[in-house]
Amino acid sequence: MGNEGTLPLQPAAGGHFGESTGDNSAEYMRISFIQVNSLLHMAGALGPLRGMGVHGALNWQFTQQDNNITKLFLTYQAHGVIKGDFAKLAPIVDRVQNSQ
């Protein structure tokens, strides 16, 4: 939506993750589960998937390492009915998430 927007995340079940820039806004996902310092589950669709009838589950797992560093393991599973080959879209979504 632009370079000067904000990406708020309300860290509670029912909270949302979205973006706002001026008068424009988008809701990407809803928080469905939080286990403090361990797990965060979000449901919805990211980016252009929102308009394709696709729904996904984005799961964040946090693990404290011995060296006082937190390891993050991220998975995003999406499904839906879209025109074309969904399998061709998956690598694109994966690249975008890896770049973020």
Image: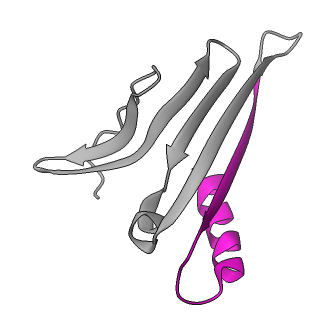
Q: Position of residue 25 (x, y in %)?
A: 22, 50
Q: Is residue 78 above or below residue 22?
A: below
User: Foreground residue, 26 or 32?
Assistant: 32
Q: Residue at x 53, y 88 (%)?
A: 83
Q: Position of residue 99 (x, y in %)?
A: 61, 55
Q: Residue at x 52, y 65 (%)?
A: 54
Q: Position of residue 47 (x, y in %)?
A: 44, 61
Q: Is residue 79 above or below residue 86?
A: above
Where is the N terminus found, in terms of image quarters? bottom left
Residue 93 is covered by the magenta coloring: yes
* Left or right position of 96 against 18: right
Q: Residue at x 73, y 29 (%)?
A: 61
Q: Is residue 73 above or below residue 55?
A: above
Q: Is residue 65 above or below residue 78?
A: above
Instruction: Name, please, the residue furthest toward the left.
Output: 23
Point out the stretch of residues depicted in magenta: 71-100
Q: Residue at x 30, y 39 (%)?
A: 6
Instruction: Name, please, the residue furthest toward the front.
Output: 81
Q: Position of residue 48 (x, y in %)?
A: 43, 68
